[in-house]
Image (spheres, rainbow, N blue to C red):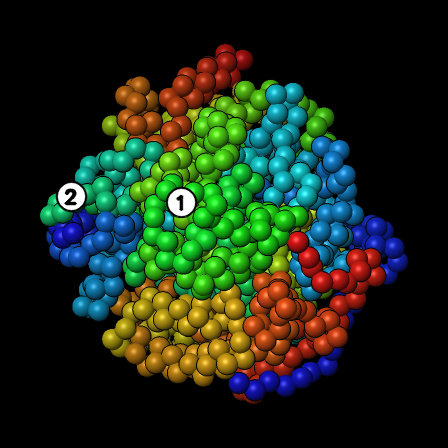
Amino acid sequence: MKYAEGSPIQDTKAPEGPIEDRWEKRKFAAKLVNPANKRKLNVIVVGTGLAGGSAAATLGELGYNVKSFCYQDTPRRAHSIAAQGGINAAKNYRGDGDSVYRLFYDTVKGGDFRSRESNVYRLAQVSVNIIDQAVAQGVPFAREYGGLLDTRSFGGAQVSRTFYARGQTGQQLLLGAYQALERQVAAGTVEMFTRHEMLDLIIDNGRARGVIVRDMVTGEIERHVADAVVLATGGYGNVFFLSTNAKGCNTTAIWRAHERGAYFANPCYTQIHPTCIPVSGEYQSKLTLMSESLRNDGRVWVPLRKGDDRLPGDIPDDERDYYLERIYPAFGNLVPRDIASRAAKNVCDEGRGVGPGGLGVYLDFRDAIGRLGRDAVEKKYGNLFEMYERITGENPYDQPMRIYPAVHYTMGGLWVDYDLQSTIPGLFVIGEANFSDHGANRLGASALMQGLADGYFVLPTTLGDYLAAGPFGEVNEEAVAEAEAKVTSRIERLLAVNGTRTPDSFHRELGRLMWDYCGMERTEESLRKALERIPELRAEFWANVKVSGANEELNQVLEKAGRVADFFDLAELMCLDALVRSESCGGHFRAESQDADGEALRDDEHFAHVSAWEHSPEGEPVLHKEPLEYDYVKMSQRSYK
Amino acid sequence: MNLTLKVWRQSGPSDSGRMVKYRVEEVSPDMSFLEMLDVLNERLILEGDDPIAFDHDCREGICGMCGMVINGVAHGEQVATTTCQLHMRHFEDGATITIEPWRAAPFPVVKDLVVDRSAFDRIIQAGGFVSVPAGSAPDAHSLPVRKEDADSAFDAATCIGCGACVAACPNGSASLFTAAKITHLSLLPQGQPERLSRAKAMVDQMDAEGFGGCTNTGECTAVCPKGIPLDTIAQMNSDYLKANAK
Ligand SMILES: Cc1cc2nc3c(=O)[nH]c(=O)nc-3n(C[C@H](O)[C@H](O)[C@H](O)COP(=O)(O)OP(=O)(O)OC[C@H]3O[C@@H](n4cnc5c(N)ncnc54)[C@H](O)[C@@H]3O)c2cc1C
Ligand code: SF4
Ligand code: FES
């Protein structure tokens, strides 16, 4: 696949000056909207996860007229609900040396020097307000006997800054945002549209002015216009078919915005989570994450000897290889996700994997149970152990868990500036759907932090600055009708094929291909193969997919087919991006670029930039580079040894 | 395993609906219940039939989207388990399994096994929150909370809003769902200022939606995948009475 190189881009909104003052400066420079005008300004927020839910609620509180959309039957079910482990914040409640600066430093380093310093610093600053906000809403975080909040340390951090609510932190934070949202629905500032899927973006006069959505119950295609549109539609990990994401997670909203002109940044940056339950068979429909907080007390190992098929309990300690502790003595089992995942792949590739197909490693609690007692372990991890037993039928108190890496999070997303505005004026993108803060690798417990930082604190300020120039008047009927016609004709096209393969069968095949060729390890050869194969499979999809039923009803096959169609296009861009970035960084591992120990080798001279892709309807995608500069954290090769 | 399924099919709210029989073969015991239905649906699509519509999303027991009455029990017989977490190893080879939607007047059927649970959102809208706009919060440590209270509040807060409690209740009551939220917030200091008005507004909304009253049958807790305890309902009633006495 060919591409063209376009002009470089700059993030023009980030203020200059000392990094500690930049957000303060930006807030002060942001224009304010007269309270009486806010009611006249309409904002569409698509997505009700941590990012979208908190944003819609906050915009409603500020007095804007908000419409909120989600594809589930209620906003409370957004995928954020599934986050288990926790949320980071630089509160330094433990006095263990944490600070805003340290969280900033860890995040830039953890992102392997592929994120923006200004953004990350702001994230670390705002993190402390998030915890305050959540506690005031009644989020029942874990507490100590003295009544103060408990924290734990989480993958990749040496301080204890992760706040948690048993293994259900995402649920509790999302319910906090959901309740704030429902409060605004009752107050009449937010109108809620559940079971509505966004299928296109309306652009008029160069500005994002609305969305075309499908009512998933009646099939009606609806048009909604506004003065600004916010996308908070989450990540696209489901391009791999098997991932830890909820089944409905998709790329449709951001992909269609991309087709309308929003640049897509770093699409190839994918996070593979090291601790998931391995695949059990062909019918597998999703993968389940075991929170990596388990790595605080569980020890990861495989048999020293290849083909050792004794039961784990029968293998004595000196015949086990606690490979993370061996290779990375400083961080041991707590190395960042990308490193833990690849290490698991390596030992399995050596033939030392355990369980069906040799695609698994042990996560063993024997020593923790010995040290802390079974009760203490149960208190900490009880619900996770239960979840594991439900799925596998095995009891982790008696035998080690089997885990294997799985696709979990996508650092890439729509390009946004410091204000979280995309390259389309009036289109803002928040949460996992944007690319902004995690560079090439996200640290554990940082996605919840980013989603809520964006929604509660950053967007409400920067969006106001944009809206101060509004309202933007009537939307041109032609622009609306064009977008609507595009959506309708695409649906008709999907229904008309009437072929012999289901949308899911194509999705599985695409996912398999992406995992094999653009997964944990990528090579020029594998990526070229993928780029050859994807267009063929896409052509077959459009010639041979079978979508049963009609548009004018609840039709889950049609919903699925539309999402799979977009995944094909996205998959192609991911592979191209991965091919062009011939360095390794964070979650993007190019086998050609590794050091003598097999660790990821960055190439800062050629790749210290964000790759922002512009869609061109007929021709080749255009690559715009945003140079990254590091004034505060010195660029260095990550080392966790 | 080979199984016979009897599944409720209803094309839309105006259709009267009926049970339809399907054979499914070569089911692996490691499959989840929903994966078994996926396999059947793939076949139905190719045969030109309408696949069975059912709600689901996270498939790990936390979003609350899935829910079916399996062999007469909401979410099936395995305790503290959502439909999506149920695995086929708990069924016998050759068994016949009946699958029906939640049945309750305030949860009208949308299609097949999909029902409309928006009444739950309206109960939350009535008062299931703490009124605290973003940016107005004091430091999180300014108000310590007893660990026991925080833990009990958490237990109540784990409700996933699935609606199994309503489906299981002979009166179609939403008391367990409503009480879980009331209890979560009334156990915490942050929830005190609005405690009584909240209880009153939420209970009144629950009644307005047409949910039945609670007669303490306990069927709700028995099927609740999160084990929300029955004593939350006592807490709700006590707050509600106090609110009305005011
Ligand atoms: C199993 C698991 C555990 C995790 N644990 C943690 C953790 O411990 N700590 C942490 O920091 N992060 C964790 N993460 C990551 C984190 O949960 C997510 O990155 C984050 O919740 C994403 O939030 P979001 O608001 O951006 O999007 P989401 O929560 O995914 O919400 C997306 C919203 O968009 C809507 N939507 C999507 N497409 C459309 C469309 N086309 N039309 C209309 N609506 C649409 C959906 O209905 C939904 O409301 C975890 C992720 C997983 C999968
Ligand atoms: S109380 Fe239990 S059964 Fe009822 S909605 Fe909540 S989790 Fe579901
Ligand atoms: S699908 Fe989310 S709880 Fe079952």
Q: Is residue B5 left or right of residue B110?
A: left
Residue B128 is left or right of residue A360, and the answer is right
Which one is in front, A153 or B71?
A153
Single out the residue that lies furthest toward the front. A318
When the figure is inspected, residue A217 is found, relative to residue A522, above or below; the finding is above
Residue of label 2: B92
Residue in the image at 74% along x and 51% along y: A104
Q: Amino acid at mark 2?
A: Glu
Q: In the orientation shown, which residue stands out farthest toward the right?
A: A17
Is residue A597 among what the camera can see? yes
Residue depicted at 22% across the width and 69% down the height: B46
Q: Residue at x 29, y 54 (%)?
A: B35
The residue lying at 39 percent from left, 69 percent from top is A512
Image coords of residue A631 (percent x, y): 83, 61
Task: Provide the residue designation for mark 1.
Answer: A315
Q: Nearer the viewer, residue A550 or B24?
A: B24
Q: Nearer the viewer, residue A600 or A3?
A: A600
For mark 2, give the secondary structure: loop
Q: Chain of mark 1?
A: A
Local crowd size for mark 2, using a 10 Å CA cut-off: few (<14), some (14–19), many (≥20): few
- The disc at residue B43 is none
